[in-house]
Image: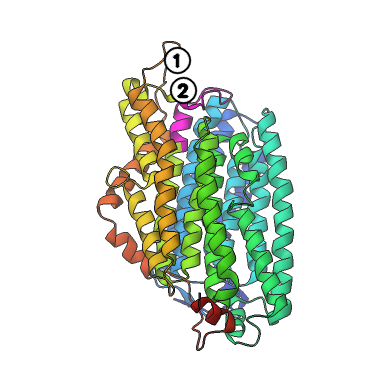
Amino acid sequence: MSFDLSIPAQLSAALAPELLLSVGAMLLLLLAGWGDESARRERTVGAWSIVVCVLTLAVVVWMWLNGAKATPGIIAVDGFRWATDIVILIATIITIALTIDYSRIEELVSAETHVLVLFASAGMMVLVAARDLIMVFLGIELMSIAVYILAGANRRSSKAAEASLKYFLLGAFSTGFLLYGIALVYGATGSTNLSDIGAKVTGATIAGAPMLLIGIGLLIVGFGFKVAAVPFHMWAPDVYEGAPTPITGYMAVAVKAAAFAALLRVWREAFPGALGSWHFAMWWLAVLTMVVGNLVALVQKNLKRMLAYSSISHAGYLLVAVVANNQLGSAAFLFYILAYTLATMGAFAVVIALGEPGERNQSLSDFAGLWTVRPWLASAMAVFMLSLLGFPIAGGMGFFAKWYVLQAALAATHPETALAVIIVLTSVMSTGYYLAVVMVMFMRPRPANAPPVRPVRAPTFLVIYASAIVLLFFGIFPAGLLGVARVNVPNVVASTAASPPEAALARR
């Protein structure tokens, strides 16, 4: 199956998954808007939203299995796109399922929340497919505008309103950096197409041009905000804590997956010839993100806030895959983001399962003695925490996720030994807060005044235990999944000669 992207009809066919998801969202928006708000309408729209996601997922898998490819153009038609789309759609389905249960607990009846999740996911899929900086911007805006609203979906919560406003203001600010970066890269290369930029930057004449370097720097700042990398992470803790719990998980995994996929594609396809120009900045960005995220997470007592800083630290590990700048780094990203998605969404599902109206029970102490009343729920939460930690066997595929990032760093053209050491040290540091959750659940008594744990509803039940089983399965048999990831990485422009910045890097 091959698409000629210069023909509008075939370009539309290549964007079939994104168009299907968008059309489904528009139809469901009509359903959500007709009639009075009610819990029944909210659940109906949520159920149909899951159906739309499943159909979109089927189209993605069908195009992947049929070897869809395309002529060079503004979008990519490759395995990297399909693999990331699958992760995004899995996260979307989980988010909608959890939102249905969360709405029952909080007595919310806003059916449009599910529609906004679909629109955000459509934007993410456009972002993942983009092979042109203008398409990157379009995807980010489609994603961001919907997520700004989702952060404040609980209109009765002042924290949610604060989270939405902070996210909007800082998100708009970061978009300015991204746009200026795109403009300067265009000014330096005369193109916004990633492959064209890569071919021109590989030449020694413009690789060190000031306009290009400033443009790359502004792109790093713009992407840094989107992935919550230190020091551009200021919005994440407050937004993650204030947003509704399912949306917090969605922002932590789906937004991060899409932004990192775009970052990897842009850097691998457009800027491999300017490695020496951006390597130093990206290296320190990865280090600061790993260290600061883990250090601040150690002192958090609110579970959502702790998971927010955990998310920041994981952005640092994923940045190592970008710094490695090799195929193994891209493959490690795909493996890592699936493990991270399942573990993080599973953890937030447990928070929802134990939830009380008003999200009053998000302190670590509220999980005390969970083993004595819900042993299987406590065991699943332990798997999620150990997976995020990267603990072998009990942590499932989380261990191999970090192991492959570590291998990618050591397999770089100039081995990133220092980064590999920092990955290990910060992972050890993270035991202080991940194991704290496990200790509280298994080693502390249940308080006498603790509210009873009600039965877990079917959607949340399926999310929790299916996620735990998949994590443990691929923790025992990771090779097949890694093999798929290895052959579905972004293209890279071959460099015939080291540019001056790369030569300088080689002498370090």
**Which residue is farthest top?**
448
Residue receiving disc 2: 366
Q: Residue at x 37, y 32 (%)?
A: 438
Mark 1, secondary structure of its residue? loop
Q: Is residue 450 inside the magenta stretch?
A: no
Asked if the residues shown at circle 2 and circle 1 are in contact, with their CB atoms under 8 angstroms apart, the answer is yes
Residue 90 shown left or right of residue 166 in the figure = left
Q: Residue at x 62, y 72 (%)?
A: 132
Q: Residues within 10 Å of mark 2 (few under 14, many from 20)?
A: many
Considering only order in the chain, which callout, 1 or 2, is on the residue closer to the N terminus? Answer: 2
Magenta range: 348-366
As drawn, 405 above or below 468: below
**Which residue is farthest front?**
508
Query: Would residue 46 be visible to someone looking at this image?
Result: no
Q: Amino acid at mark 2?
A: Asp
Residue 242 shown left or right of residue 66 in the figure = right
* Residue 425 vs residue 226, the one in the foreground: 425
Residue 110 x/y as whole percent: 63, 34
Q: Quadrant of the N terminus?
A: bottom left
Q: Residues within 10 Å of mark 1 (few under 14, many from 20)?
A: few
Query: Would residue 246 be visible to someone looking at this image?
Result: yes
Residue 307 x/y as whole percent: 50, 39
Residue receiving disc 1: 450
Q: Residue at x 62, y 79 (%)?
A: 197
Mark 2, secondary structure of its residue? helix
Q: Amino acid at mark 1?
A: Ala
* Residue 264 vs residue 136, the one in the foreground: 264
